Image: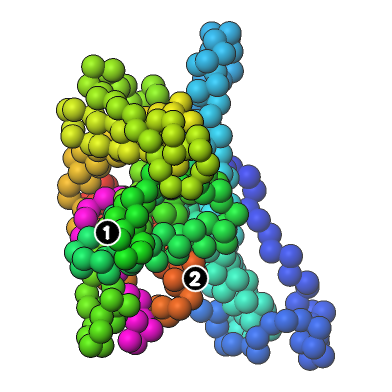
Amino acid sequence: MSGLTTTSAPPRLLAFPPRRRFTHHSWTSLSIPKPHPRAPRITCMAAPYLITKLESAEKTWKELSVKLADPDIVSNPSEYQRLAQSVAELDEVVSIYKEYKDCEKQLEESKALADEDGNDEEMAAMISYEIESLSNQIKELEEKLKTKLLPTDPLDARNIMLEVRAGTGGDEAGIWAGDLVRMYEKYCERNNWKFNPVSSTEAERGGYKTFVMEIKGKRVYSKLKYESGVHRVQRVPHTETQGRVHTSTATVAIMPEADEVEVVIDPKDIELTTARSGGAGGQNVNKVETAVDLVHKPTGIRIFCSEERSQLQNKHRAFQLLRAKLYKIKLREQQELIRSQRKSQVGTGSRAEKIRTYNFKDNRVTDHRLKINYELTGFLGGDIDNTIQACTSLEQKELLEELAESVGAPAG
């Protein structure tokens, strides 16, 4: 055993029928493998680092549960709610850990019975079956516990601002940026998310120089945060007359929406002018100064909003986008400080490095972080869940390694 504490309940007696009642035809009614001369010795123990973290979580849960019964805490609604939330977050971990310990105890009892069994092949087979079943159950519970112990990203539930910006490649880069915008719009539709344009600048030959959209839905940031970075395309552009393959890029930035209390903007730092929007939208758009041109002087961030029909709405959108950009800068600084030791690019998605190449000739998408290829046509149609799940798994693996290192043990 691994030093796990168990309750003082009497030992569990396996519900085996009396040996004298076993007959040869009994095997037809039992889903048990053929008899073995001796039950195998299977060990299914969690890594020491995991047990350390679980025992710590269980101890914290017990301490917080006691505090919740304290009259002083009960009379303080805000403190009571805070502690109740902490207990609720640990409830599932503690419950699974209890089930894990129960299974381990049953496994040890089964092994003890196997040692005492003698040469009865029928009983040995039943015990072998029980040991295998418990061992598999323990493995499943251990995987659940590993996931539950991982730190959660508090931003995962937030809505986002998604910005696509044409990179190198001239006119083709703008066209490619437009293709990426459509890919993300289709992905939003697959997830029943709402998306609305916030700001855009069209490119001369089609597509966009920049395009920002707001995306609202269930846990948007948790999925799209891995999309930040440089997206490279290799194809023969529409603008190419000699059939040569060009390489162009576009950058994607994912910005979780920030509340006003999280990012304070000093009005003195803002330079705001208005202009006529132009384009479709009727006489109001073309004759009245509804567009807003906003500059944040300390950072040099400039935002031009003309998508809405009124100046007030465009101003609100501009400040919303500025707040998200400033919040992203703040988060990046924090994450670089906290995760400075991490080697993987997966997790924050904040580094402007090439994350993916889209090769039209071979109908292939290569994710360079994962070293995995995907089919291009479906990918551009919004079918990107597989790569997002792979990024999530890679991040979880890395976080598990950090968890193991925090208690000085290998993640195994």
Q: Which residues are magenta?
A: 348-365
Identify the residue under disc 1.
166
Q: Is residue 12 left or right of residue 291?
A: right
Mark 2 crowd level (few <14, some 14–19, many ≥20, 10 Å Cα): some
Mark toward the start of the polypeptide (1 vs 2): 1
Mark 1 crowd level (few <14, some 14–19, many ≥20, 10 Å Cα): many
Q: Which amino acid, mark 2? A: Gly
Q: CA distance from mark 1 to mark 2?
A: 20 Å
Whether the magenta-drawn stretch holds residue 349 is answered as yes
Q: Which amino acid, mark 1? A: Ala
Q: Nearer the viewer, residue 185 or 97?
A: 185
Query: Above or below — where is 386 with respect to 50?
Result: below
Residue depicted at x 60% and y 54%: 192
Give the x, y percent position of residue 210. Answer: 31, 52
Q: Is residue 265 visible?
A: yes
Whether the magenta-drawn stretch holds residue 106 is answered as no
Q: Nearer the viewer, residue 277 or 400?
A: 277
Residue depicted at x 30% and y 27%: 273
Q: Is residue 114 left or right of residue 149?
A: right
Query: Above or below — where is 382 with respect to 314?
Result: below
Residue 381's disc is: 2
Q: Nearer the viewer, residue 406 or 296?
A: 296
Q: Is residue 112 visible?
A: no
Give the x, y percent position of residue 10. Answer: 64, 48
Residue depicted at x 73% and y 81%: 31
Query: Residue 242's image quarter?
Result: bottom left
